[in-house]
Amino acid sequence: MKLFDMLTSEDIKRIKEDKGELDLTKRVKELDNSLSIALDINDNYQRENKKLKEKVRSAEGETSIIKAVGLNSPEMRALQARVKELENNRPLNTMDEVAYRELEGKNQANVKEIDRLSEENSNLRLMKKL
């Protein structure tokens, strides 16, 4: 005879209930452990996220300070003034360049005329000697 055959239906029912309670207790402990692990991981992530947000905020603050100081520095102001000055003088520079080219063309024409007159003068001297 087997042990299982000797048990009454009430014994079998009680064993199943006890086993079910043990299984449920074990499962509750497993879930509780998993929950603890998940909460620890969440806490770690939240702490790390807070640190990263502080670093980002600090870096953004430093960047805005650098931009403000850089754009308002005496050197930058001087450069901006020089750019405006050059932009305002640009039409004059263009006009000067056009005038220079005209004068250069007239100068070359005058040089050619001088060369021609010099050669003519030389020819007249030769003719005078003859």
Image (tube, rainbow, N blue to C red):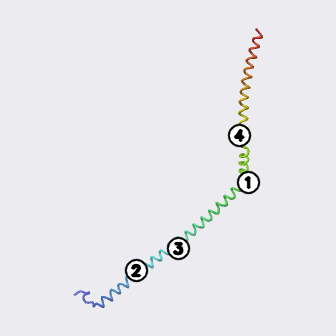
From the image, which quarter does the C terminus lie in?
top right
From the image, which quarter does the N terminus lie in?
bottom left
Label 3 or label 1, whichever comes before in sequence order: 3
20 vs 85, left or right, is left
Where is mark 1, residue-wise?
A: 74
Q: Label 4 neighbourhood size at 10 Å, few (<14), some (14-19), many (20+)? A: few
Q: Residue at x 50, y 74 (%)?
A: 40
Determine the CA span between mark 3 and mark 1: 48 Å
Where is mark 4, residue-wise?
A: 94
Where is mark 3, residue-wise?
A: 43
Instruction: Indicate whether 116 appears above or below 70.
Output: above
Label pair 3/2, CB-CB below 8 angstroms: no
Say which mark, if any, is on residue 27: 2
Determine the CA span between mark 4 and mark 2: 89 Å
Residue 46 in percent (x, y) is at: 54, 71
Instruction: Indicate whether 58 appears above or below 100.
Output: below
* Residue 8 in which image quadrant: bottom left
Determine the CA span between mark 1 and mark 2: 72 Å
Label pair 4/1, CB-CB below 8 angstroms: no
